[in-house]
Image (cartoon, grey):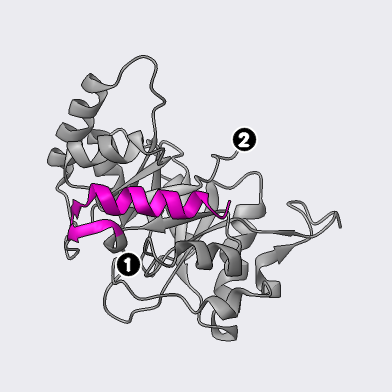
Amino acid sequence: MKLQLPCTKFCGFTRVGDIQAALELGVEAIGLNFYPKSKRYIEPKRARSMLDDFSNSLGASKVKPQFIGVFVDDTPEQVLEVLRSCPLDAIQLHGEESTQWIEKAESLPTWPGVPILRALPYRGPEDDALIRSWGAMVASETSSVFGLLIDAYDPVHKGGTGKQVAWELLDPRPDCFRFNGADGSGEAPHDVPFLLAGGLTPENVARGMKIVRPAGVDVASGIESEPGIKDVEKMKRFMDAYRSCV
């Protein structure tokens, strides 16, 4: 059974209080950034401490969110080291990883089979082959890849740039996002599920949802007062705007 793609993912947390505030607003997934070059980078030891603090404060009646670790061009061995210290529910690959990365990871004797979210840009036909190859893994019941995240392209920075995806390229949905079934049996075509990221804010998320119709949304810079520091009022306005169009 594939991990369910969250409807709302807030990313780049560095403080437990911000995580708690987001969850009180109904956010389903929390992103922790393990990319050292990111302004929202968190060291694995600090992330583990945050997760422990969160677990200790979690009441029995509260629903545990998905904790997703963001990695950029790390080897499977490097990701495994983080997984050994941080109890993550899934990982997000946000670099130049190929589909062979999955094969290498799964060949490791102690690889835990963690669900994988693949972040990709979409600039038009030049990215069709990339979407198809990873989308096929999402469509396969035997693959650990459970969804895509469509982010704005940047030749240097990997996510959190505030740049917006060209929404008009996703409406109507390009054929590369559609598959005839997980086993190629010819069943009714369906869209590969993805989260829309890239420059979302409380002011534009409703419009982005209406145009693109993604399975969910991912945001970092649009809900912050500064990188890694979340603004509770912005988070609330973002969720209110998101819910207004669901």
Q: What residue span does the magenta drawing correspond to?
A: 223-246
Q: Is residue 190 above or below residue 107?
A: below
Q: CA distance from mark 2 to mark 1?
A: 28 Å
Location of mark 2 (residue): 1
Q: Is residue 113 above or below residue 140?
A: above
Magenta segment includes 225: yes
From this viewpoint, is residue 114 visible? Answer: yes
Q: Secondary structure at mark 2?
A: loop
| Nearer to the camera, 80 or 12 | 12
The residue that appears at 27% across and 79% down in the rendered structure is 156
Bin the neighbour count of mark 2 within 10 Å (Cα to Cα): few under 14, some 14-19, many 20 and up.
few
Q: Position of residue 242 (x, y in %)?
A: 48, 53
Location of mark 1 (residue): 159
Left or right: where 232 falls relative to 166: left
Magenta segment includes 144: no
- The disc placed on residue 222 is none
| Nearer to the camera, 143 or 25 | 25
Q: Secondary structure at mark 1?
A: loop
Tell me which amino acid carries mark 1.
Answer: Gly
The residue that appears at 37% across and 35% down in the rendered structure is 110
Tell me which amino acid carries mark 2.
Answer: Met
| Nearer to the camera, 234 or 186 | 234
Q: Quadrant of the N terminus?
A: top right
Q: Quadrant of residue 223?
A: bottom left
